[in-house]
Image (cartoon, coloured by chain):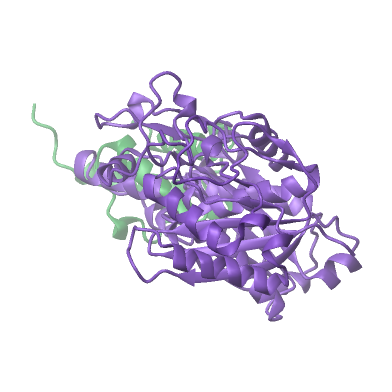
Amino acid sequence: MDTIKTIKELAAKQFGGEADAIDENAPVDQLGIDSLGFLEFLFELEDAMGFPIPQESVAHVRTLRELATVIDELIAARPAAPA
Amino acid sequence: MGAIAPIGASPGECFESAVCGRSGVERVPAELYTGTASLAAARVRTDISGYWPAHQRAQLDRAAQLALIAAAQAIADAELYLSDEESLRAGVYWGTGLGGATSIEESYRQLLLGSGRVRPTTVVMGMNNAAAGQISIANGLRGPLLNVSTACSSSATAIGEAYRALLAGYADVIVAGGSEALITDGNLRAWDAMQALAHADANDASRSCKPFSANRTGIVLGEGAAAVVLEREDRARARGAQIRAELAGYGNASDARGISKPDADGQVRAMRAALAQAGLSPADIDYVNAHGTATSIGDVVETTALKCVFSDSHMPPVSSTKALHGHLMGGTGALELVLAIGAIARCVVPPTAHLEEPDPACDLDYVPNHARAARISAVMSNSFGFGGMNAVLVARAYQS
């Protein structure tokens, strides 16, 4: 799964614009996303990923790239689905 | 002035509808309501989804969206451009009964019946003062801000209190009004449980609200927003503002009787207080926009109160425009003031539509079913809320 692609597509859907045009290394406030908007974005992302994103895990996230890293770590830490 | 309501998306459109008898009432769609009663409601039909980008709209309850539109219209109509310093003395006084009712109901629906999760924006969308805050933010109004919640008189009270604040010198200009958007399943069920709602007219649902008519069956819930820009006269004149009318008097009095049962005494005192502040006698009032909700008791009590204030020889025409726009609850007083001021400007009294059967207990001149040309210099607008909260505004044609 390409996590950053998923995140950028969701950001484009929620905040407008083209996913490819979003700078994943820019601080989210420079993308026009305020703190409440970012929480709302995380809420939508939880729906998209299908698992909760603990607040403490994203407390220091400043960019969408950093967010993708956190999400990948959460995925890696999740128990494998039963075969 | 600004308005977005079930009968139009501007003050002019609303007034045209009120005069022509165009109703904004319709049968409640099945997808909105899980009850079994046959109900009607008056919804804003204008598509407002394109006013904001999706992520901004996601932080605005429908009531706040309607409020922002009405406030923006009023500010544009007043050609109000404020310097940084002037914005410090520009306020917002806003009325609403239930604030972000739609957001709150949706949060409980998701919590209890849906995903079990609550959106992070629920608090800022649901809180009662959300619309007032959003108007302040959107327009850079940094003076006094007040959110008023006195049920059905909320926006009339907000406008009246704004008027007092200007007179007291707390501000130079205030955007005042109110908004409501509570046509949700839960609210429809709650109001119906009170047996306060009108049955949908079996032949024509748009005629379900019948104030002062013997066959009235109750309130039709409405939604929408209306706003006025109140400004100190000296400031308005100095900048050459187009002055729509003079707000001349405000009366506020409580019944202290029943939480939902109206009482003529408080209504009479509110009307008399508004007249006294305006320096007008009852004979000076040329039109009363009644509260007139079309409940069996409310219309009779208001009729009794009007008879106490106005003698038989000086009874002005009285109409309830709720027949067409429904009861906007916290927004209704502002919309009805806008319509009453429209009557001054257009020299037309809007009728009480759907007055089909005279009620012996409601025996005033309600301008039944057809608008009436008249010279109108001064108007009264009545708003009476649950809790026994009565607010009355008097406006008159502006003469420099």
Q: Tell me what residue is drawn at x 79 percent, y 42 percent.
A: B346
Against B23, is B295 above or below?
below
Q: Is residue A34 left or right of residue B202?
A: right
Q: Residue furthest left?
A: A82
Q: Quadrant of the C terminus of chain B?
A: bottom right
Q: Along the line of sight, which residue is nearer the eye, B100 or A71? A: B100
Residue B246: x %, y % from top left: 77, 62
Q: Is residue B134 left or right of residue B207?
A: right
Residue B292: x %, y % from top left: 50, 47
**What colour has chain B?**
purple
Q: Is residue A19 left or right of residue B389?
A: right
Residue B345 seen from this side: yes
Against B157, is A34 above or below?
above
Q: Residue furthest top?
A: B203
Q: Is residue A29 left or right of residue B202?
A: right
Q: Tell me what residue is drawn at x 77 percent, y 74 percent.
A: B85
Residue B176: x %, y % from top left: 63, 61
Residue B92: x %, y % from top left: 62, 65
- Res A6 → quadrant: top left
**What colour has chain A?**
green
Q: Tell me what residue is drawn at x 64 percent, y 54 percent.
A: B315
Residue B95 seen from this side: no
Q: Along the line of sight, which residue is nearer the eye, B376 or B239? A: B376
